[in-house]
């Protein structure tokens, strides 16, 4: 059955009438990874997400699948090794979504790392991550560094290091993990919030949920419940009466997006800022984005806004490294801001906190997982599903099955390797060129949907003559695809989390918002009241993404 909003009543009915081995709370990358791991080991699995899939931190990251070079500086060798090795695995599972990206680390006279330290550090980084020799770091002299990136400050730069990282779209990665979990039998429901728990003999065995689209109560029974609620993990521990000992420490991170012509970097750069931190500038399609900040956060987790101090910090940092650019706040096209769900450590500042993940088990048997990184989602899932399997083996006599996700390709694939993605992109480009659509459209389709571009293009061919431009026909085909296969229930699901348009192509929303709204409204039978509410939601999202707020 299609993973479609139209089938939601059926999925809810099934969820209510079943007894699950595992219920996962949270549809960010952590929960999605757990659902996939558990379902592929044969566990009867359900997942509930209170908002849309990836609407929490998993759509607000720097979108890198990286080993975290800076953690090497903090001597977190095991963490760097684990996430470093995961990069290559996740790249193999979804090469259209996790793409190799050479990162330039410019060296300056008084930068974080000297030449020798950088050379040794990057070498250790490569070794820990098991990077193949052809991809290992190269040290550059001043001219070579400036050739790679002519925008760098010519007075300051003395050389650079070029090393291997991977780039992704966090929301798409989460969505494909969810869809792959569903293809292994998991039930995954968005807009379904856990509001309380039920217990038998002191052990948690039911989650009382609210279906936020119908306001109905949905009770889901499961032998084990895992909370992967990211920044909301402590709230669920509190509901369970088990919020004791270690707690979360939330830190805020902001990204600014500039049109390519305002910040025309040729390639991804990881550079020093005057306060001793480092930030990224990453070109992507029509834009370059820059981030991130790292500050303690105590505000509303459901509404995290980019404030003036965050934006000015990033702009000053860019202008310091790219000294001919002179960016101002007016050049910002859009922004996004999220919070890291880290584990509190006494006396440590935001950027000193470890990115290690941890599992908590309460007296009632509620398991919670927090900390960690997007990059390490697969390993985190393996760890906690191992725990779940051991417990089910003890209590239910279920046979322990080992993790299988190292070889489960994500939906959108499989592709044998990155070259196969390039060939596929070229073939899509050829198919589009006769319709006045360009290379950008081919890149966008393949980076977003992988091989799922095929059904989108088939629909496009069918629809083209009915629309006033090829671009609109393609958009319509995309909307139909997402409604049928990606559980889109609102305009924001489509423009933010399925397509990334709000962050990577905000102008296209201003241009097409009426079209998107009308198309969704017609297909989902919204009626005028719901349509107006959705219109307001789009306008607010555009406002919040493009406005810099007073701190
Ligand atoms: P979330 O994505 O927040 O998911 C938790 C979900 O639980 C949410 O969707 C929420 O709605 C849901 N939920 C909460 N309560 C309930 C409830 N009661 N019922 C149902 N659902 C509920 N990592 C990297 O590897 N690479 C990077 O480049 C990177 N950059 C980052 C930059 C920034 C600014 C930030 C903030 C983080 C970055 N990270 C990065 C870290 C990474 O993004 C996070 O570790 C990861 O996204 C956390 O995912 P999660 O699923 O645990 O949490």
Image (tube, rainbow, N blue to C red):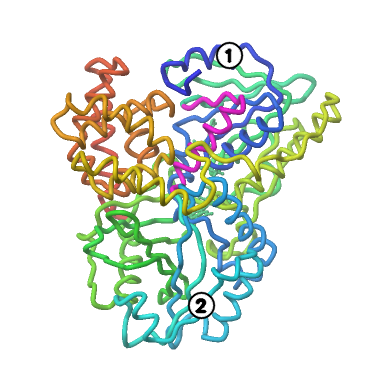
- Element type where label 1 sits in the image: helix
Label 2 sits on a secondary structure element that is: strand
**Front disc: 1 or 2:** 2
Q: Which residues are magenta?
A: 169-190
Can residue 252 be seen?
no
Secondary structure, magenta segment, majority class: helix
Check the image and report above or below for 41 versus 279.
above
Residue identified by numbered label 1: 14
Q: Is residue 149 magenta?
A: no
Let me know if residue 327 appears in the view. yes
Q: Specify the quadrant of the image occupied by residue 543.
A: top left
Q: CA distance from mark 1 to mark 2?
A: 54 Å
Classify residue 407 as left or right of residue 158.
right
> Image quadrant of residue 287?
bottom left
Task: Give coordinates of residue 179: x percent, y percent.
Answer: 52, 32
Residue at 48 percent of width and 77 percent of height: 161
- Mark 2 within 8 Å of ligand 1, using the beta carbon: no
Residue 270 screen position, x and y as percent: 44, 69
**Label 2 crowding class (10 Å Cα cut-off): few <14, some 14-19, many 20+?**
some
Query: Label 2 belongs to which residue?
Result: 138
Q: Earlier in the sequence, mark 1 or mark 2?
A: 1
Left or right relative to 165: residue 206: right
Question: Would you identify the image quadrant in which residue 449 lies?
Answer: top left
């Amino acid at each position: 059955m299609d993973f479609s909003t139209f089938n939601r009543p059926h999925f809810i009915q099934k969820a209510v009438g079943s007894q699950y081995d595992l219920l996962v709370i949270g549809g960010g990358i952590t929960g999605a990874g757990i659902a996939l791991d558990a379902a592929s080991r044969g566990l009867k699995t359900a997942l509930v997400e209170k908002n849309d899939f990836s609407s929490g931190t998993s759509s607000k990251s720097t979108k890198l699948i990286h080993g975290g070079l800076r953690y090497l500086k903090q001597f977190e060798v095991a963490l760097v090794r684990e996430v470093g090795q995961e990069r290559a695995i996740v790249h193999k599972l979804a090469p259209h979504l996790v793409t190799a990206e050479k990162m330039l680390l410019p060296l300056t006279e008084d930068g974080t790392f000297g030449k020798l330290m950088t050379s040794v550090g990057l070498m250790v980084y490569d070794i820990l991550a098991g990077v193949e020799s052809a991809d290992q770091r190269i040290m550059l002299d001043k001219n070579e560094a400036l050739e790679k990136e002519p925008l760098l400050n010519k007075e300051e730069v003395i050389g650079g290091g070029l090393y291997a990282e991977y780039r992704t779209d966090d929301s798409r990665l989460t969505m494909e993990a969810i869809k792959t979990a569903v293809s292994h039998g998991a039930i995954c429901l968005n807009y379904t919030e856990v509001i309380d728990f039920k217990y038998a003999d002191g052990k948690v065995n039911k989650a009382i949920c609210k279906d936020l689209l119908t306001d109905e109560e949905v009770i889901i029974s499961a032998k084990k419940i895992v909370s992967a609620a990211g920044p909301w993990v402590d709230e669920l521990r509190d509901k369970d009466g088990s919020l004791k000992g270690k707690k979360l420490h939330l830190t805020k991170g902001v990204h600014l997006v500039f049109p390519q012509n305002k910040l025309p970097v040729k390639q991804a750069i990881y550079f020093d800022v005057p306060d001793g931190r480092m930030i990224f500038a990453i070109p992507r399609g029509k834009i370059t984005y820059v981030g991130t900040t790292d500050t303690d956060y105590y505000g509303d987790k459901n509404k995290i806004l980019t404030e003036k101090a965050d934006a000015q910090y990033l702009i000053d940092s860019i202008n310091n490294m790219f000294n001919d650019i002179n960016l101002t706040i007016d050049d910002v096209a859009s922004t996004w801001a999220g919070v890291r769900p880290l584990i509190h450590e006494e006396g440590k500042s935001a950027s000193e906190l470890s990115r290690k993940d941890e599992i908590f088990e309460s007296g009632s048997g509620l398991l919670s997982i927090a900390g960690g990184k997007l990059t390490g989602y697969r390993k985190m899932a393996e760890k906690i599903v191992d725990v779940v399997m051991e417990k089910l083996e003890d209590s239910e006599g279920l046979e322990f099955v080992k993790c299988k996700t190292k070889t489960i390709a994500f939906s959108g694939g499989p592709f044998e390797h990155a070259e196969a993605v390039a060939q596929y992109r070229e073939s899509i480009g050829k198919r589009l060129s006769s319709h006045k659509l360009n290379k950008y459209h081919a890149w966008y389709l393949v980076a977003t949907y992988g091989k799922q571009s095929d059904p989108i293009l088939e629909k496009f061919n069918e629809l083209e003559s009915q629309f006033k431009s090829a671009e609109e026909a393609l958009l319509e085909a995309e909307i139909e695809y997402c409604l049928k296969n990606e559980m889109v229930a609102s305009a924001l699901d489509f423009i933010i989390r399925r397509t990334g348009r709000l962050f990577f192509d905000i102008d296209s929303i201003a241009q097409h918002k009426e079209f998107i709204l009308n198309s969704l409204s017609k297909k989902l039978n919204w009626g005028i009241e719901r349509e107006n509410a959705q219109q307001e939601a789009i306008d607010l999202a555009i406002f919040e993404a493009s406005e810099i707020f007073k701190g």
